Image (cartoon, rainbow, N blue to C red):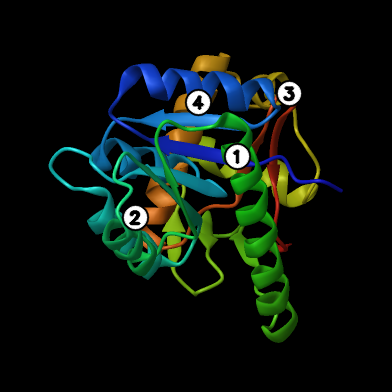
Amino acid sequence: MTMIPDVLIVEDHADLCEEVVAYLQARGMTVRAAANGRAMDEALAVRQPDVILLDLGLPKEDGVLIARRLMAAGRTGIIMITARGRVEDRILGLNAGADIYLTKPLDMRELEAAIGSVMRRWAGAREQADASAPVRSWQLDTARWRLVAPGGGGVSLSGAEFRLLSLFFETPDAVVDRQTLADHLEMDPRGLDLLMHRLRRKVELETGEVLPLRTVRGRGYAFVVPVQI
C-alpha cells in the first residue's frame, strides 16, 4: 500500500508557501504550513509529519538551528529549501540534519521527487528498526482512566478523552469517521477537532511521545500502532 505523504512546510515567504501547498495538495499529499519555528512546534504538537520542508533563512530561529533539534528528536525527514546555493551553505544544511538540500527557485517536480526519496529512505530505516526492536503498545487503563505510552509515561484522561480513545482501542487500525466520533461524544465537529488537538498536545507534553492518532483525509481518524486494553 502506498503511503500518502504528510508534509509540513516551514517557510516565511507567503507566495512561495502558497505555491508549494497548492501543488503538493494537487498531487494528493496532506500539507500544512508554518511561518517560523514557533508555529512549526505548534503544528508538530498536533501531528507529526513524514517530511518537513524547511527554509534556511527563517526569522529568529534559522533553519540550521531548527534542523539540529529536529535531528536530535529523530522523528522525521527534512528537505532544506533556500536561496543560498554556495557549497558551504549546502554542507552546513546537510550537516545540520537535512536529508536533501534544494535551492530556490524550486522546480515543483524536483520537490515532489525529493519528498518521495525521503519517504522511501525513512520507510526503510523504520522497517529495519521495527525488525530489531520489540513491539511496544499503547495501553488504556479502563479502571483509572489513564493512557499509558509505550515508554511507560502515563496521562490521566477526562471523560471525553477516555470515551474517544475507547473507540480506537476497541477497533485498532480501523478508520473511524468524524461524524461517528462526534455523535459518540455528543459534540459538534468543531468541538471534536479541538478535543483532538488538546489530547495530542497533552500526551506529547506529559509523555514525550507522539500520540499515533492520525488524520485520514476525507475519511476520519485511525490509531495506527499496537494497542492494549
Nearer mark to the viewer, of 2 and 4: 4
The span from disc 2 to disc 4 (Cα, nearest Å) is 30 Å
Q: Which residue is mark 1?
A: 110
Determine which residue is flagged by label 4.
20
Residue drawn 58% across and 59% down?
Answer: 143
Structural distance between the alpha carbons of marks 1 and 2:
36 Å
| Circle nearer the viewer, 3 or 4 | 4
Identify the residue shown where x is 68% and y is 26%: 184
Residue nearest the observer in this picture, 205 or 112? 112
Q: Quadrant of the C terminus?
A: bottom right
In the rendered image, which quarter is residue 46 located in? top left
Q: Is 158 on the left-hand or right-hand side of 183? A: left
Asked which quadrant contains residue 165, the reply is: top right
Task: Specify the farthest residue to the front.
Answer: 86
Crowding at dot 4, Cα within 10 Å, few <14 / some 14-19 / many 20+, comes out as many
**Which residue lies under the disc numbered 3?**
180
**Residue to which mark 2 is pinned:** 205
